[in-house]
Image (tube, rainbow, N blue to C red):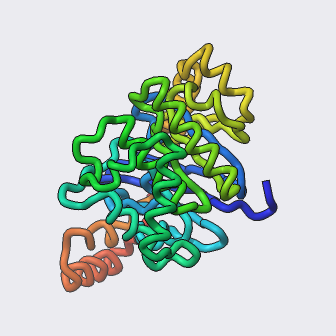
Amino acid sequence: MSATPLLSIAGLTASVDEKTILQGIDLAVGAGETHVLMGPNGAGKSTMGHVIMGDPVYTVTQGTITFDGQDITNLSPDKRSRAGLFLSFQAPVEIPGVPLSSFLRAQIAGRPGLEMKGKEFRRRVKELAAELDMDTAYLNRELGVGFSGGEKKKVEMLQLLLLQPKLAILDETDSGLDVDALGVVSRGMDAYRKSTDGSLVIITHNTRILEHLEVDRVHVMVNGRIVREDDASLIPWIDANGFDSFEREAAAQLAAEQAEQADQPAPAVDPVRAASMNLGAGMVQSLRATLDANGATCGSSDKQ
């Protein structure tokens, strides 16, 4: 990895509806690297991708996300996309009334180095579609409407190759694909890496799609925390043993933390401060004067 990672996540904690989903995430991805985020269902892997992309459903309560030297923690999803981030969805959206070609044209509009005139755009898109074994007739169809799961994934690979992002997050891209569709997706990822030397973060809970990739680092997530990081040798181990041992370790760590918190003495309470949570300012001043007159000290008990 280069001295300065392309993507750097430090102490990231995020929640939805006041429920903490991600806890203290640290992650660094260098330019040109392929990282894999694995873990059991419900571990928080997809949430991680959405938080990196700035999905407003989630609230970052602690930590920072730095991309290409810029703090993007509070940037909108659109600005993150234009900075060079890309997220493929586990369940791609359908947009009735919007042809795929129009959607693709709108995506590259205003992006330096990507804008093309009509004829050049059509030629480029047809080239990429052929590379993915994709019928060019799909370009005139409504985005995602009536597409099979494999066809939707092809559309996402088409977007990836057209946009050429600096870093692509692929969320369960292999989910529900047959062998042929999986091969197309693998070719798309390979073409992306060769044409851009871009970085990949692949989110998955199985190892099928990883057989076709050169992986630099593997991260295992359980209960919203990254509990293990290693090189690609971890993949066959997970394939043989699953995530049970990681889940047991995470459960033991959580139990130890809860026990440690239970042993901590309760913090001293300032009676005036506590009262101020429920009383108006005038009543608080009156209470403080009464305590002072009786010789009471806030936050301590009387000595006998």
The percent coordinates of residue 53 (x first, y second) are 46, 59
Q: Look at the picture and state if 295 lies above or below 42.
A: below
Question: Of all residues shown, which one is farthest toward the top?
Answer: 240
- Asked if one can make out residue 238 in the rendered structure from this viewpoint, the answer is yes
The percent coordinates of residue 202 (x first, y second) are 56, 42
Closest to the observer, 181 or 2 = 181
Closest to the observer, 77 or 190 = 190
Closest to the observer, 38 or 183 = 183
- Image point 75% across, 64% down: which residue? 4
Q: In this view, does 245 lie to the left or right of 229?
A: left
The quadrant of the rendering that contains the C terminus is: bottom left
- Image point 27% across, 59% down: which residue? 99
The percent coordinates of residue 186 (x first, y second) are 57, 37
Q: Look at the picture and state if 174 lies above or below 132.
A: above
- Image point 48% across, 27% down: which residue? 180
Q: Look at the picture and state if 54 lies above or below 235.
A: below
- Image point 54% across, 45% down: which residue? 131
- Asked if one can make out residue 75 in the rendered structure from this viewpoint, the answer is no
Q: Look at the picture and state if 62 lies above or below 296.
A: above
Q: In this view, does 141 lie to the left or right of 256?
A: left
The percent coordinates of residue 229 (x first, y second) are 68, 37
